[in-house]
């Protein structure tokens, strides 16, 4: 019994550490992408930075449930349900912004300027986020194996958001790299549209997510 408790504690502690790492990385990613996006006039970078903010909020939700589980508390189903609805609204707002901003940029032939910070942020994200997403999926599997199916489901969803961030970093990197050439100025707003398909899917999943009633 003691060994089982110790194993559960180890799995939970690892999951908590991964969520703290996600919050730290997503915060830096969001700040760098948003600042560089505004400076460069890049729709793709601003969309990428906004998605990073949503990723940070998703990690905060999972972290709060993990910490409640560690304390032996019963999670508030209504609070988690409201939080997921909030994230869904943010995703849908992101979709609306990207579509409008991309159309305006394409119609007005607006050129995004070169920005070294944006390139660095995308490259760093592309290097770190896939490994973090994989580690979170493994942690979710371990939690599920320990009987914590509800929190495991939340963590798998959060891992998907982290994986999405890696995908968007690649499309954003390609967009701003191509947009640096005059003939490819349209690549930046077009790259931002990659966000739309993923954001709609994630938004729908967050909106229909079942509220958490138990820790198991």
Image (cartoon, grey):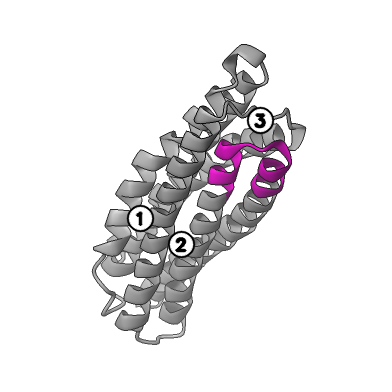
Image quarter in which the N terminus is found: bottom left
Dominant secondary structure of the residues highlighted in magenta in the image: helix
- Within 10 Å of disc 2 (Cα), the crowding (few <14, some 14-19, many 20+) is many
Is there CB contact under 8 Å for labels 2 and 1? yes
Query: How far is the residue under mark 3 from the one under mark 2?
Result: 30 Å
Q: Residue at x 56, y 29 (%)?
A: 188
The region drawn magenta spans 33-49
Residue at numbered disc 2:
58
Tag of residue 112: 3
Residue at numbered disc 1:
157
98 and 100: which is toward the camera: 100
Q: Residue furthest top?
A: 183
Q: Is residue 116 visible?
A: yes
- Within 10 Å of disc 3 (Cα), the crowding (few <14, some 14-19, many 20+) is many
134 and 193: which is toward the camera: 193
On the image, the x and y values in percent for residue 75 come to: 36, 82
Q: Is residue 213 above or below residue 45?
A: below
On the image, the x and y values in percent for residue 176 come to: 62, 27
Q: Residue furthest front?
A: 108
Query: How far is the residue under mark 3 from the one under mark 1?
Result: 33 Å
Q: Residue at x 65, y 48 (%)?
A: 34
Q: Quadrant of residue 118?
A: top right
């Amino acid at each position: 019994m003691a060994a089982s408790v110790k194993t559960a504690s180890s799995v939970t502690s690892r999951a908590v550490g991964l969520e703290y790492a996600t919050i730290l990385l997503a915060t830096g990613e969001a700040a760098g992408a948003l600042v560089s996006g505004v400076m460069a006039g890049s729709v793709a970078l601003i969309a990428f930075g906004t998605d990073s903010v949503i990723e940070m909020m998703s990690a905060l939700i999972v972290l709060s449930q993990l910490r409640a589980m560690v304390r032996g508390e019963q999670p508030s189903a209504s609070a988690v349900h409201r939080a997921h609805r909030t994230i869904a609204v943010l995703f849908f707002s992101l979709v609306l912004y990207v579509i409008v901003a991309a159309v305006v940029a394409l119609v007005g032939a607006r050129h995004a300027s070169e920005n070294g910070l944006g390139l660095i942020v995308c490259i760093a994200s592309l290097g770190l986020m896939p490994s973090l997403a994989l580690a979170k999926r493994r942690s979710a599997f371990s939690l599920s194996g320990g009987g914590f199916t509800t929190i495991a489901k939340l963590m798998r969803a959060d891992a998907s958001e982290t994986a999405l961030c890696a995908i968007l970093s690649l499309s954003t990197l390609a967009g701003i790299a191509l947009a640096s050439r005059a003939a490819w100025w349209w690549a930046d707003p077009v790259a931002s549209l990659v966000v739309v398909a993923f954001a709609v899917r994630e938004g729908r999943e967050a909106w229909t997510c079942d509220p958490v009633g138990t820790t198991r």
